[in-house]
Image: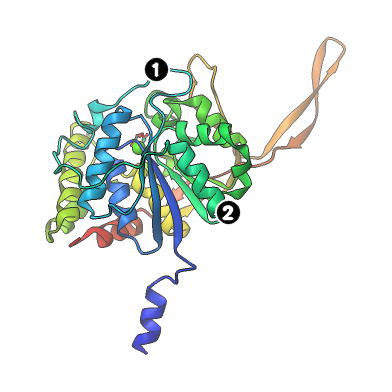
């Protein structure tokens, strides 16, 4: 019977999901990466770095040090864009610490960066394994957009795209925009318009998934390099959140990885989502059409008359609810003792 149990517990090689993790590390990026590297359901085929929380160079250094900590120098790590497509970069050391990793100085990396440009690495890997690669971008979508602009033929060859980004219930940067979209709205517009299987893991569910002292204490009972680093980042985030009256830290990026591991963690109805790029107050907003229709206005003399409604085609699964505790327990269970 034990053999049957083991068989059911460990995913078969066919069930293991190949992912490319695109990141702007970043404290919650760090937690997401530690989860991805310690989950048997995922095979991290590459890590591409994008500027966002920190500059491109700082992000690359952070990624190299984290992958070295996890003893995974076998994974290609590539630098990508150096700035958003059409605007200046906005870095977030205010939230993530001076070095972007909660001011934690990890040992210098044993790993070497891959010489390829991140978007090119994405293109090569997708063409080499058509319909097998899931993209998990958890920063601004600049690298993903650059890959699509260079070679749009990858769109139908990517298995799935699971982004941390967007919101249909207001922003975190301002009233309307979530940080990853706000940092490169044109890139996000390209990614939402291309028509591939896209899941949007936004603030709507990230804000319900708070890493609190209850979970931190569980990590404090065990030790290991990944465990202790995750504990230190988690403590930094909990202390920071407490300064703003929050009982825990939103697990934005880790939840995107969680959805890649187990999509049943979230409720994600299909919607049509547009990205606002011109609004004075709404640039960077992900505008979701919940009811899936638009009114048809017809000019009749000196005014328009509503003469029907037209369906809109969904282009994303938008996560609107989450089993937060089940995800947080999964997160802790994967990190404990590593
Ligand atoms: O809005 C949250 C997102 O912005 C997360 O990905 C965080 O790491 C920052 O990049
Ligand atoms: Ca991020």
Say whether residue 166 is visible: no
Write down the quadrant of residue 82 in the picture: top left
Q: Nearer the viewer, residue 301 or 162?
A: 162
* Few, some or many residues within 10 Å of mark 1 (<14, 14–19, 20+): few
Task: Judge from the rendering whether residue 322 lies leftward or rightward of residue 210; answer left or right.
Answer: right
Taking the image in four quarters, ligand 2 sits in the one at top left
Find residue 55 and report its horizontal and vertical position in percent.
30, 27
Q: Which mark is residue 129?
A: none
Quadrant into which the N terminus falls: bottom left
Q: Nearer the viewer, residue 259 or 152?
A: 152
Find residue 104 and report its horizontal and vertical position in percent.
14, 39
Identify residue for label 2. 130
Find residue 26 and report its horizontal and vertical position in percent.
28, 36
Find residue 300 and report its horizontal and vertical position in percent.
86, 16
Extreme-right residue of the structure: 301
Task: Judge from the rendering whether residue 314 lies leftward or rightward of residue 242; answer left or right.
Answer: right
Sequence-wise, the earlier of marks 1 and 2 is: 1
């Amino acid at each position: 019977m034990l053999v049957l149990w083991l068989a059911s517990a460990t995913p078969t090689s066919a069930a293991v999901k190949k992912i490319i993790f695109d990141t702007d590390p970043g404290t919650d990026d760090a937690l997401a990466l530690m989860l991805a590297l310690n989950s048997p359901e995922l095979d991290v085929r590459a890590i591409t770095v994008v500027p966002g929380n920190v500059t491109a160079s700082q992000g690359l250094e952070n990624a190299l040090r984290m992958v070295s900590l996890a003893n995974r120098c076998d994974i290609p790590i590539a630098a990508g864009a150096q700035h958003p497509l059409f605007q200046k970069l906005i870095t977030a050391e205010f939230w993530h610490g001076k070095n972007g990793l909660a001011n934690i100085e990890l040992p210098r990396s044993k790993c070497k960066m891959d010489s390829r440009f991140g978007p090119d690495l994405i293109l090569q890997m997708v063409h080499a394994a058509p319909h097998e690669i899931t993209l998990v971008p958890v920063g601004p979508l600049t690298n993903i957009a650059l890959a699509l602009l260079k070679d749009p033929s990858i769109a139908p060859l990517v298995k799935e795209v699971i982004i941390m980004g967007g919101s249909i219930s207001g922003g975190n940067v301002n009233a309307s925009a979530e940080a990853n979209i706000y940092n490169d709205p044109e890139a996000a517009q390209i990614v939402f318009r291309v028509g591939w299987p896209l899941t949007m893991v936004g603030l709507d569910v990230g804000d319900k998934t708070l890493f609190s002292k209850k979970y931190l204490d569980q990590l404090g009972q065990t030790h290991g390099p990944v465990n202790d680093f995750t504990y230190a980042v988690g403590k930094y985030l909990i202390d920071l959140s407490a300064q703003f009256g929050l009982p825990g830290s939103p697990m934005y990026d880790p939840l995107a990885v969680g959805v890649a591991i187990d999509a049943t963690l979230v409720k994600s109805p299909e919607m049509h989502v547009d990205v606002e790029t011109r609004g004075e107050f709404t640039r960077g907003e992900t505008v979701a059409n919940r009811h899936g229709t638009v009114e048809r206005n017809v000019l009749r003399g000196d005014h328009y008359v509503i003469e029907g409604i037209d369906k809109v085609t969904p282009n994303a699964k938008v996560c609107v609810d989450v089993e937060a505790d089940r995800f947080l327990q999964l997160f802790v269970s994967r990190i404990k003792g590593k």
